[in-house]
Image (cartoon, rainbow, N blue to C red):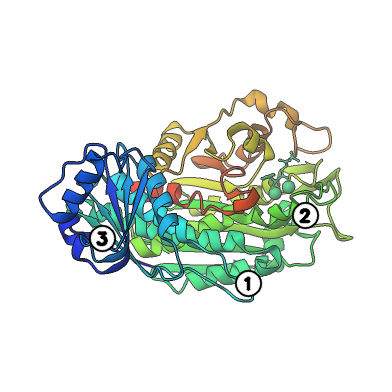
Amino acid sequence: MNFELKPMGLVGASTEKCDALIVLVPQDFKGGKDDLSVLVAQAIKSADLETKTGKLLPLYRPVQANAARVVLAGVGSGSARDVRAAVIAAVASVKTASLKKLMVCFAAPAREEAVRAVVTAVAEATYVYTHTKSKPEGRTLSKVLVGASNATEVQATFDRAVGIVAGSELAKEWANRPANHATPTLLGKAAQELAKLPKISCEVLGPKEVAKLGMGSFMAVAQGSDQPLRFIVLHYNGAAKLQAPTVLVGKGITFDCGGISIKPAPEMDEMKFDMSGAASVLGTFRALAALKPAINVVGLIAACENLINGQAAKPGDVVTSMSGQTIEILNTDAEGRLVLCDALTYAERFKPTAVVDIATLTGACVIALGGVRSGLFSTQDALADALFAAGDAAQDLCWRMPLDDEYAEGLKTTFADIANVGGRAGGSITAAKFLQRFAEKFPWAHLDIAGTAWKSGAAKGATGRPVGLLVEYLLGQARNT
Ligand code: BES
Ligand code: MN
Ligand code: ZN
């Protein structure tokens, strides 16, 4: 899908030949004298069009436009949320097999957040998963024109949104693929594919190399599956070699049955999404390749299955992590922290300015924050604030959670340096406290995306989050250096 920003208001939009035209009309609309503006003004005056967000007035081949279908869509205040809701509704109303070229036009100068919302909402409303369908009926839309009278002002925001869409669609795609079509090996191949893009390189380690590194905790999870693990190291080099990188660490459990501490059957299929953190790292690199900021970024993905064969780790087993700390595996279903801790230790070698891990880590986080905001944990206020602000800007929200040391009490055990679970209370926080023990050597943040990475129910599917937040944060780093 190709996006293009055009410097035009309703006059230009009315002559543009396309399959469908969506006109975004704010509550304070002041029309010009051209035919399309007059039509919009009349529709408002006669109360046939409400400018409240989400209200639509569909038209067919009006003489005032050069499109078969035209939808006037109220966008209320014109905020990102309003525009997003309006565009999703409007696109749904014009989406047919013949929709190839779409124009979305602002009837008033466009705010940056609204431009971003148009691009991401059009992408979201038209994404189709096809990878494992025998007769794929994919996205028909191939060209999206966005019209704004102040196009030059919002061009940079527009380009950024287009880059983020490319990244979050890649993340969605990999997260959506079933576990037998997205094995650790296939994730490794996807990363190697990314290395064909400018400024990106990639290295994929297998069981032998990981054993040599001493990643005993990661290996303990992987040993329960016949699929070999992969440890993926991606580099994006946009700045001088000497400039310290930001490191992203993704949880890449391609399927999580819980291991011996097995999960209940209902909805277990959704544990194919347990590599969404890894997918968001892949997606972020895709966006970096498109946007080319002057920074260095390292992406680490610990990928394996959490299954149950004869070698599977047992509750009570004690393993030695790469850091040297011993871990008692009291619950084999708390496997995310076991793979992440070794990846965090590996991150030390890059002397990073910051390390952000992204993981579908705890069901407790879904209970705490639902599907609206990701959990954000950090001991560093500046890093937490930057990530929070990036989430706001990208409309990919998160919420900061506490890390008081008292929350780590439950992780104490007689049989190792630390246990991998600490009771049900505050489960997302105890998980973060576990990770913190492996992240003492650099500024660190943890995003628990268990509630936000995918949607359940009828619209089951990956969301591509938090690629928007991560890309926005990284671009902010580029501005600061
Ligand atoms: N991948 C799950 C977390 C999860 C569960 C994400 C449900 C989204 C929806 C993780 O590996 C896990 O199983 N966590 C356990 C931890 C517990 C054993 C301390 C959990 O949340 O139940
Ligand atoms: Mn688990
Ligand atoms: Zn898991």
Q: Which residue is drawn at 46% across and 70% down?
A: 97
Q: Residue 20, position in %: x, y?
A: 33, 63
Q: Residue 76, position in %: x, y?
A: 31, 38
In front of the other: 401 or 110: 110
Classed neighbour count for the residue bearing mark 2: other residues with Cα under 10 Å, few (<14), some (14–19), many (≥20): many
> Which residue position is annotated with label 3?
62
Q: In this view, does 10 lie above or below 373?
A: below
> Which residue position is annotated with label 1?
133
Q: In this view, does 447 lie above or below 58?
A: above
Looking at the rendered structure, which numbered label has been put on residue 220?
A: 2
Q: Could you tell which of marks 2 and 3 lies nearer the N-terminus?
A: 3
Dot 3: element: loop
Q: Residue at x 79, y 62 (%)?
A: 225
In front of the other: 267 or 14: 14
Q: Is residue 262 above or below residue 172?
A: above
Q: Do tag 1 and tag 2 residues touch (Cβ < 8 Å)?
A: no
The quadrant where residue 48 appears: top left
Dot 1: element: loop
Q: How far apart are marks 2 and 3 (CA)?
A: 65 Å
Q: Which residue lies furthest to the left in this view?
A: 33
Mark 3 or mark 1: which is in front?
3
